[in-house]
């Protein structure tokens, strides 16, 4: 709950519920302070349950809003583009089984594709694909976003397309980035491989070679050779 | 068998600088963090050093934090903040003259703030980074970097070059502030996506950290669990967080900071005292805020708080340090039964919680290292020392993950903040396009414009804004900052496209959003 968002009257009611004495004489900020003192310990317990990821600015800055209001008035109307006016679609991972997709397609593209392919009825569709599945969300708008959740996405490569659907034919307008989804289980894969990363060897040989970046060819070749060894990082011990 | 313990403190605050206002509440995040966390921690390192105690830990210093800590304007304001607090302490010493317990607390704060002021502005010459550098040179700490502006990399990853810029700018900024390139990185929010290791490797990063399930769910399954690092196929090492030791410090059930002897966080003279008396030490518009002068201990589950006793609290940190150590040793013994090498316990925390939320936290760490120096069973270690000793580690494909609530990405992408990503992704792409298009330009004005676009993009990418929107703290500020940087970027981008540059606007942004002001950022986007 954000105390700062409440009116003084609401705060007073809250204080009454909590049995805070002297509430009638308090200013808004005093009410907030008094209520916080009663409520905060509980709030913290709640927060600290999950590994207690309380960040610095989550504590003690509940009064920030009034300040914002004051300063905000001096800086109103920060305009953001409503549309970017080109075709795009992006997929961002949310958790192992959900993605967030957002897109925009221009009227011009829709018309062009419809014209070129002789499509009369325009159904804009979102297609979400993974390594072995495909999901279609029909009748979406030309600009929007969508949360898609499906167990089948876990641990898969996922991407999305936006396009026109005509009968069974899908005409893609824009194809998204690829996302490797997180896993939520312990792998059964047991093929253990160890790697040795020995920077020191590379350094010592480098020093032996005179440690000069612009040396003549022969040492450069040696160095490059060395790089290939050390970047392939000697692999040992397959069980 | 001896085992290893790796303490990692992640120090970060978003870049907040408002020269356009005389007083700006969110700037106090920095002033309070220095006073309560960074300076007390460094002073305790000094103490350990003077007592001949060895200590080793890893500290991430994010680029925005370093930029702020070495910003003359902000440090000048910090000095004023300290002076104001000292005046309040004096005033409090007078007010409480007849009350022994409160009077000695007022004096306790006066002495404490005076010591910090002297340390930062005399001994460290006004730049607290000198303190970190000293212990870096002494080999007590390994300092690692973070994303340039703590950008949430899995969401920036739709554009490799934008991710690369977050890393590359960070690495260069680290070099500037600490005189050497970083070997490790704290990934912003511990967030890893598949493929990030390539970019890290390219930038000379040898190791990073992931949450427990980043390693536990990797493929193949890790033979040592999180008690040894793993390599990605690029040869970059990943260390995994130990859940038990994190819980010990922060959990509501077993956590130390809730001990009744410790200082109560919420009772502060900024809220407790008469308005007329305190009005010069809170927000000028009358909003009450914390002043840092807190006189009560947690006491118990009661509203009737008792006065704080610093000595008793300090003694408690000794008990807790011993307990923590004992628990780790017991735990390591158990784990080592299943391993053919000494287990490594990795305990990462937000640095600011030691001192801010847990006032006695820096003393806990001081006592922990002191206790550890008497023990042969567990040895503090830093990542490069470990990797030099254990060069051979298992190779896995790490699981994408973060250390946020539920372990994945929803804290930074949900209904409260998803609107920002349409813009962040698009302007990221515009940035790389523009940098490419004008890469051969020698026109000073074009270069300035591109560099300011990069600054606005980087600032918009800070994960802090999305986080604040989710948690419901300072939402308006977070929203405004996000919008402002996107807006500024688009205005510059359109100016550049039309080659119609508004210098007044550009100059005002260069002055205000001055992060990385001495870097030629545009080249990192090519």
Image: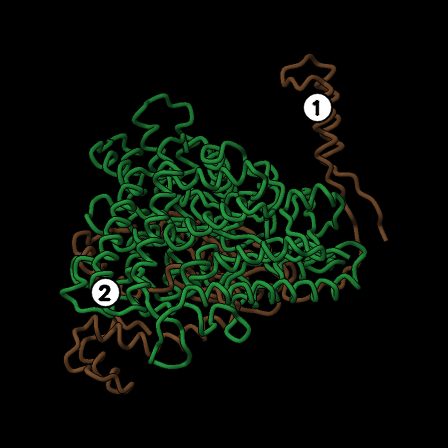
Chain colours: A brown, B green
Instruction: Name the mark on residue B97.
Output: 2
Number of dots carrying numbers: 2
Q: Where, quadrant-wise, is the N terminus of chain B in this rendering?
A: bottom right
Cα separation, mark 1 vs mark 2, equals 69 Å
Asked if the residues shown at circle 1 and circle 2 are in contact, with their CB atoms under 8 angstroms apart, the answer is no
Residue A49 seen in the figure: yes
Q: Chain of mark 1?
A: A
Q: Residue furthest top?
A: A216
A166, above or below A46, in the image: above
Q: Residue at x 57, y 49 (%)?
A: B57
Frontmost residue, B490 versus B12:
B12
Residue, disc 1 = A206
Alpha-carbon neighbours of circle 2 within 10 Å: few (<14), some, or many (≥20)? some
| Secondary structure of the residue carrying numbered label 2 | loop
Describe the element under mark 1 as helix, strand or loop. helix
Quarter-of-image position of residue B340: bottom right
Q: Is residue A221 above or below residue B290?
A: above
């Amino acid at each position: 709950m954000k105390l700062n968002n409440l009116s003084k009257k609401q705060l007073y009611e809250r204080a009454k519920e909590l049995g805070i004495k002297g509430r009638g004489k308090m200013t808004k900020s005093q009410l907030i302070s008094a209520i916080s003192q009663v409520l905060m310990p509980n709030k913290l317990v709640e927060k600290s349950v999950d590994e207690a990821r309380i960040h610095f600015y989550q504590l003690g800055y509940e009064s920030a809003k009034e300040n914002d209001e004051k300063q905000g008035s001096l800086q109103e109307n920060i305009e953001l583009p409503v549309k970017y006016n080109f075709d795009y679609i992006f997929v961002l991972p949310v958790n192992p089984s959900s993605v967030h997709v957002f897109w925009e397609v221009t009227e011009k593209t829709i018309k062009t594709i419809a014209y070129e392919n002789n499509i009369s009825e325009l159904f804009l569709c979102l297609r979400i694909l993974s390594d072995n599945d495909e999901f279609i969300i029909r009748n979406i708008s030309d600009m929007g976003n969508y949360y898609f959740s499906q167990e089948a996405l876990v641990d898969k490569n996922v991407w999305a397309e936006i396009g026109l659907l005509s009968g069974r034919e899908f005409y893609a307008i824009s194809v998204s980035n690829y996302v490797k989804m997180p896993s939520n289980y312990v792998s059964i894969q047991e093929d253990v491989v160890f790697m040795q990363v020995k920077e020191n060897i590379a350094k010592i040989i480098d020093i032996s070679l005179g440690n000069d970046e612009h040396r003549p060819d022969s040492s450069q070749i040696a160095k490059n050779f060395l790089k290939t060894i050390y970047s392939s990082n000697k692999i040992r011990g397959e069980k | 068998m001896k085992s290893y313990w790796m303490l990692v403190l992640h120090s970060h605050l978003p870049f907040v600088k408002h020269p356009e206002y005389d007083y700006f509440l969110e700037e106090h995040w920095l002033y309070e963090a220095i006073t309560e966390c960074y300076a007390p921690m460094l002073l305790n390192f000094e103490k350990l050093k003077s007592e001949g105690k060895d200590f080793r830990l890893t500290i991430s210093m994010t680029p925005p934090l370093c930029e702020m800590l070495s910003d003359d304007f902000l440090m000048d304001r910090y000095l004023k903040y300290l002076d104001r607090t000292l005046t309040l302490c004096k005033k409090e010493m007078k007010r409480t003259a007849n009350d022994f317990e409160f009077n000695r607390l007022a004096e306790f704060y006066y002495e404490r703030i005076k010591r910090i002021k002297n340390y930062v502005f005399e001994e460290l010459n006004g730049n607290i980074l000198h303190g970190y550098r000293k212990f870096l040179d002494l080999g007590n700490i390994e300092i690692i970097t973070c994303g340039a502006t703590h950008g949430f990399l899995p969401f920036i990853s739709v554009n490799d070059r934008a991710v690369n810029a977050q890393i590359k700018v960070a690495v260069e900024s680290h070099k500037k502030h600490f005189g050497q390139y970083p070997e490790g990185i704290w990934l912003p929010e511990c967030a890893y996506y598949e493929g990030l290791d390539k970019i890290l490797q390219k930038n000379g990063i040898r190791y990073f950290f992931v949450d427990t399930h980043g390693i536990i769910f990797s493929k193949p399954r890790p033979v040592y669990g999180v008690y040894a690092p793993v390599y990605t196929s690029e040869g970059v090492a990943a260390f995994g967080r130990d859940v038990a030791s994190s819980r010990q410090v922060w959990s509501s059930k077993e956590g130390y900071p809730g001990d009744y002897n410790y200082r109560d966080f919420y009772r502060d003279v900024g809220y407790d005292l008469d308005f007329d008396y305190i009005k010069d030490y809170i927000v000028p518009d009358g909003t009450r805020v914390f002043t840092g002068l807190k006189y009560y201990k947690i006491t118990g589950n009661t509203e009737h708080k008792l006065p704080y006793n610093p000595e008793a609290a300090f003694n408690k940190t000794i008990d807790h340090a011993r307990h923590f150590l004992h628990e780790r040793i017991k735990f390591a013994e158990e784990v080592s039964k299943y391993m053919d090498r000494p287990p490594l316990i990795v305990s990462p925390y937000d640095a600011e919680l030691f001192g801010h939320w847990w006032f006695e936290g820096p003393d806990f760490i001081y006592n922990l290292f002191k206790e550890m120096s008497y023990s042969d069973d567990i040895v503090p270690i830093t990542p490069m020392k470990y990797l030099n000793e254990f060069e051979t580690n298992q190779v896995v494909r790490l699981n994408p993950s973060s250390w946020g609530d539920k372990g994945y990405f929803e804290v930074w992408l949900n209904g409260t903040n998803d609107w920002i990503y349409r813009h962040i992704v698009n302007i990221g792409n515009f940035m790389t396009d523009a940098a490419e298009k004008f890469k051969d330009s020698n026109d000073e004005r074009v270069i300035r414009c591109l560099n300011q676009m990069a600054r606005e993009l980087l600032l918009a990418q800070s994960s802090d804004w999305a986080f604040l929107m989710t948690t419901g703290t300072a939402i308006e500020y977070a929203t405004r900052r996000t919008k402002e940087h996107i807006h500024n970027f688009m205005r510059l981008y359109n100016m550049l496209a039309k080659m119609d540059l508004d210098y007044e606007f550009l100059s005002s942004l260069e002055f205000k959003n001055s992060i990385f002001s001495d870097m030629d950022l545009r080249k990192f986007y090519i």
